[in-house]
Amino acid sequence: MSPVRGADIACLEGDPAYDVHWPWKDGALSPGLTCVFRLKNEAHNLPWVLPPMLEAVQHVVIVDNLSDDGTAEVAQKVADECGAGDRITVTSYPHRVSRAGSEHLATRPDSVHSLTHFYNWSFSHVRTAYSMKWDGDMVLTREGVSILRDLSWQLEDSNAVVAVPRHPLSVESEQVAWLDLGFRFLEPWIYPMGPEFTFVKAFEWEVREFPESTTRIVAPEGLCVELKWLDRDEFAHWSDMDFDTSRAPRKRREWQVYSALRDGRGHEVPGLHRIESPPGVHVVDHVTRTWLPRAERPLVRRKGRLEV
Amino acid sequence: MVDAPTPSEPPAQLVDPAPPERRVVFVVGSGRSGTSTMAGALQTLGMTVPAPEVAADDTNPKGFAESQWVVDFHDELLERTNVSMADARPSAWFDTGRLNNFEPLRTRLHTWLEEQLVAGGPELVVKDPRLAWFLGVWRSAAMRSEAEAGYVTMLRPVTEVVGSKQRVYDARTSEVHRTAAWVNMMLHVERSTRGSARAFVRYHDLLDDWTVPVFGLGQRFDLDAVKSASANDIRKVHQFVDPSLRRVALTWDDIEVPRRLRDIAQETWEALDKLPDDGGDTPEVQATLDQLRAAYAEMYDEAQALTRSTADAARREGAREQDAGASRASDKVPHSVRAMVPPSVRRGLRKVAGRERG
């Protein structure tokens, strides 16, 4: 089967519905920021994740990838309840995507099974001048909403990329969670839309390109937490647990924290904070609305590196 | 489909007994638009302008209702970002906005604001014509201090803000620049307060009958100082607000600016003028303002391209002056002393001064 004429990235499998067509080739993009979520079975997180994001950005794109927990329906429902049903695009990507690590490495980047193609296809749905990738377990704090709202208009025409630190929050119960402030998790999330800012293949996963001359902004700490539920296997999407610490130090740290908490040794991990919420307040709300805004800065006292 | 868990209803529970509600009202807008009158009225009713204040002068005999610390803080940040108070460049908003990501600055402002809320009481007024450039970092400080932020934007016809009855030899240049700066400021103030608790007040309405807009602010922002104002407080505001303050009443006939800029400025004013009305702050008006912002940025880019030779010449002139200054400084050092400086250090100094030898 031959690729559809005009496709900017024709997929290897020859399915025209999953070729990539870049939106900037159809005319000027609108001002503003679109958040792209690629989701698989994240329905349980969306009531925390989506409302603040819908407050912060002009549009949200949800790409559901073979969920069987009603992720797409929950996303639309939450957006409707926020009065933002017209600012969300829900679509489906029905192909199994290679897991990060060795499986990804063995997959051609233009295959529908590649993370690289999945990302490019997902971001081709953006119609604003700026876009950001976001995970289905990342919850913005009030300060996070405020900063993203400002960036959504201040970045216009700047061509800057923005890195946002995030803090893993392992949820033990409705009242107790463990916040990891012992490692600096930092990578660029916000990029302009354009031919210089597309996704390419890296060894373990995809990376988004940007020119060397691009201005890089690092957002302050305390803007978002990454939810990890201790009663779920958070590492199911990895194909190889023998992490190379030089290439994936943050994954090594996540595994260290996860295994310590699973074995009841959370107090032994430097930089890991046990947080208990007041009665009647879910610990996720307590951390994002109260604990983090009040916490002394800097939150993370260990130097990290920018992962791109 | 699973039953998704339900987050707690905001706001999160507070410890008992509840402290007084903290409020910070930010008065923004172009200078000479009644920002001092509004901030002064709120102060007279009992809200706190953190001391010490900028002293009154001939341009504002009733006082500015501005905190000196706030002015100094903003001046420092403007200098750091190479942005002027009345900067007409749309890109200047990116330059000042970047500071919002600088954690030490956020911590510094939060520390100051927290101190003021403890020392000055739970309801503060912050006003400065430079304020709009840094609303992001103020918003963060208010959040961390657990204070509700409200934004009041004062509106006055552009012709009155820009116009001057004293015609000077460069009046045309001055009026064009001031009109552009007004457009840049007002369009971006509106954009940066969108989605927040905000109010727009016409300067004329404030002078005609201040009780209506100020009462409205008290209701909208739940300001105890306004809601519980005594008769004496209100008398004092009547003495403070002087309807004759509106000294300049000019139209476009009095001001000489290019047609395209004039059209954008006039349309901006007409759109902004809808915002104070009940139900006037609508998505449709905001969309119009977005279009005007894009039109202004496009016009500015063109003007910048057109005048590039002027900018390049100014840059060369500045570099020459800097070079001459560096040269004079080294000439003042006696040769015997210069000879004591190791060659590697001399090379480094020459490099810093941009005077490397080939």
Image: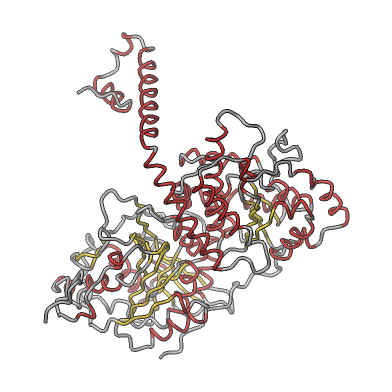
Would residue B216 appear left or right of B104 to someone viewing this image?
right
- Colour basis: secondary structure
**Residue B158: x percent and y percent?**
61, 48
Image quadrant holding the N terminus of chain A, namely bottom left
**Residue B172: x percent and y percent?**
55, 35
Instruction: Tally the marks.
Output: 0
The residue under the point 23% across, 82% down is A96
Work out whether B13 lies above or below A65: above
**Residue A308: x percent and y percent?**
27, 59
In the foreground, B212 or A142: B212
- Furthest residue to the front? B253
In the foreground, A34 or B53: A34
In the foreground, A146 or B285: B285
Would residue B211 appear left or right of A185 to someone viewing this image?
right
- Furthest residue to the left? A1
The residue under the point 55% across, 30% down is B170
**Residue B273: x percent and y percent?**
63, 58
Asked where in the image residue B174 lies, by quadrant, the reply is top right
In the foreground, B130 or A173: B130
Work out whether A236 lies above or below B169: below
Work out whether B292 lies above or below B278: above
Would residue A214 appear left or right of B297 to someone viewing this image?
left
Asked where in the image residue A281 lies, by quadrant, the reply is bottom right
- Furthest residue to the bottom? B1
Would residue A217 appear left or right of B277 to someone viewing this image?
left
The residue under the point 33% across, 11% down is B337
The residue under the point 31% across, 55% down is A305
